[in-house]
Image (cartoon, rainbow, N blue to C red):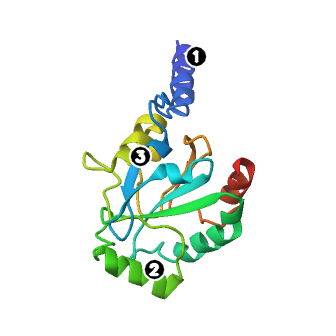
Amino acid sequence: MINLKKLFYIIIFMISFFNTGNAKYDKIFFDFNIKDINEETFALEKFKNKTVLLVNVASNCGFTKQYSELQELYDKYSEKGLVVLGVPSNQFGGQEPGSNNEIKDFCETNFNITFPMTTKIDVKGENAHPIYLWAKENFGNAAVPKWNFHKILINKDGKIEDTYSSFTKPMSKKLTSKIEEIL
């Protein structure tokens, strides 16, 4: 009886690792539109055939210094087809309270950010931007940001390759190895 119970728990534990959503991909990342930091709507299809690192960002967070490494990552791999897309959000500790203009000025002044940035949006919950709802639907809870500087890696096919927590630094070997593999 005890062995059967152990087997049951082992199977449940193993199945939990496979919970990456339905991955049915009725739509791909490049099918969506979003507004940039200047409030201009653009189609994500302009990034088609590129690898995209989608990162929800905030100006007043303990992880804000990751902006430097995000820019370094963009500088190193953009010519090979990587796009870093910064997505400001104020959903975690109210750490992005500013307007789009204030966010843009902060990023340019303090970190010389040249990678594309979106308008401030919700990245979790019922009011999340459709990109984040799509990510959750197709990759499960691993795609839902738990805090600022959560990273979603989108491959050239417009599907989620992997996700990374706020603690994974942009220039970490874990992330750069995966980027190099799929570029």
The kind of secondary structure element at disc 3 is: loop
Query: From the viewer's perspective, is residue 124 above or below residue 173?
Result: above
Q: Amino acid at mark 3?
A: Phe
Between residues 130 and 56, which one lies in front from this camera angle? 130
Badge 2 crowding class, 10 Å Cα cut-off, few under 14, some 14 to 19, many 20 or more, is some
Q: Residue at x 31, y 56 (%)?
A: 122
Q: Is disc 1 placed on a helix, strand or loop?
A: helix
Q: Nearer the viewer, residue 180 or 64?
A: 180
* Residue marked by disc 3: 32
Separation of marks 3 and 1 at Cα, in angstroms: 49 Å
Relative height, residue 123 to residue 93 (above, below): above
Kindly tell me whether residue 167 is visible in this rendering.
no
Q: Which residue is mark 2?
A: 107
Q: Residue at x 41, y 55 (%)?
A: 146
Which mark is first along the chain, 1 or 3?
A: 1
> Residue at image x 33%, y 72%?
95
